[in-house]
Amino acid sequence: MRKIICLLGLLTAVRASAQYKVVLEVEGLPANTPADSVYVAGSMNSWNPGVDKYRVSRTPDGPARVTLMLPEGPASFKFTRGSWASVETGSSGADVDNRTIVVRRDTTVRVSIAGWKDRFAPVAKKSTAGSRVHIVSDRFYMPQLNRYRRVWICLPKGYESGRHYPVLYMHDGQNLFEDTTAFSGEWGIDEAMDTLQAKTGGLIIVGIDHGGPKRINEYSPYDMERFGKGEGAAYTDFLVRTLKPFIDSAYRTRKGRADTYVAGSSMGGLISMYAILRYPNVFGGAGIFSPAFWVAPGLKRDVLRWGADVRGRLYFYAGAQESSEMVPDMMGIYQLLRRLSAAPMQTVVRPDGKHNEPTWRQEFPAFVEWVTKKPPVKPMPKF
């Protein structure tokens, strides 16, 4: 019986790790396509727009193609010419949704690209940021990384009243408040917080822009063969030792652990998890949305190393329509941490959830309500 169980476990593991050959054939390119390289960016490479391994081979006498090895399940992607400034578009230059395929076997997928973003005149977007969204600095110095970054802040209704507020630090600041800076739609954080004001009492939201080509490095605590040196430790040091002291001195914040949170999606979900592990006495809650745990095999080691010290509230979210590794990877880290820590944890898996801003925007209010919920005060015993 024991041998049968072991064999079944082995077969399950082999099936879970199965990779299929997916050939993307690009049958049509826009007439104004330059001679530079075309790449695939998607769930298989943390949406990096210019990785050489995912470059499309262009031939003079046949369709351009790229061969991918993908696990079973859904995969999302877009074509770029090396950056998000030159991502594919519709024939009129309008943004297009992510392409999605469901991998079940070796297959060839034929596609056409209608346009490139940088080949059209920029479309003027209407600002969507509310009146309480401000730029703290366009060039906030990050001494731990020796570079500069734009930092945003969203103040709650009634901030002028003299009260002090909890603070939520969020990554990918470009995508939080303002459609004119967002990659693929914004989270609507300021609108969501207006709606949640009565339930939460208000929060200060601090958004830190990602570093463009340095995004994956800054949000990964671990060196990566595919993407290079991990700078996540230095980035979290910046949050805790440089940015938080500045915000606490310049704004009316509640400075303690119980009122300090961190959140992000994809690579931002990974670095949020790492932040609460590395600084459990600083962060009292974390929103871990669609975390890119697949690029971080060292995370399990750090959960074992620091997990017992975590006391904050952790909100794990993933969508079933993301990569096939997303939910198992997230649940594996959750279950490991659950064995080590008594910290409150919430897991949410949406059957229709995709790896994109609209999905995270929908889930954000539930996270805020949960992470700011304080445990009930036990009445004093009567004698």
Image: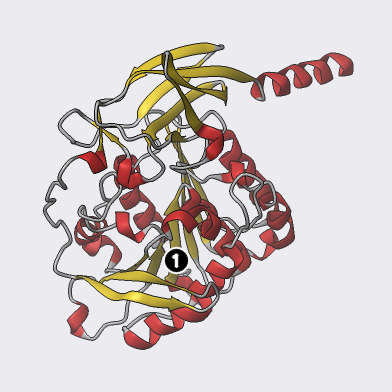
Q: In which quadrant is the N terminus drawn?
A: top right
The answer to whether 308 appears left or right of 343 in the picture is: right
The structure residue drawn at horizontal position 43% and vertical position 36%, both measured from the top left corner, is 37
The structure residue drawn at horizontal position 53% and vertical position 72%, both measured from the top left corner, is 145
The structure residue drawn at horizontal position 27% and vertical position 52%, both measured from the top left corner, is 182
The structure residue drawn at horizontal position 18% and vertical position 61%, both measured from the top left corner, is 129
Q: Residue 78: x percent and y percent?
A: 38, 32
Q: Nearer the viewer, residue 311 or 70?
A: 70
Q: Nearer the viewer, residue 368 or 71?
A: 71
Give the mark count.
1
- Secondary structure under badge 1? strand
Specify the color scheme. secondary structure
The answer to whether 108 appears left or right of 97 in the picture is: right
Q: Residue 227: x percent and y percent?
A: 58, 48
Kind of residue at disc 1: Tyr
Crowd band around label 1 with a 10 angstrom C-alpha radius: few (<14), some (14–19), many (20+): many
Q: Nearer the viewer, residue 69 or 291?
A: 69
| Residue 188 seen in the current view | yes
Quadrant assignment, res 327 = top right
In the picture shown, does residue 204 fall above or below 37? below
Residue, disc 1: 261
| Residue 381 seen in the current view | no
Q: Nearer the viewer, residue 175 or 374?
A: 175
The answer to whether 194 appears left or right of 319 in the picture is: left
Q: Residue 360: x percent and y percent?
A: 35, 45
Q: Residue 46: x percent and y percent?
A: 49, 42
In the picture shown, does residue 72 fall above or below 116? above
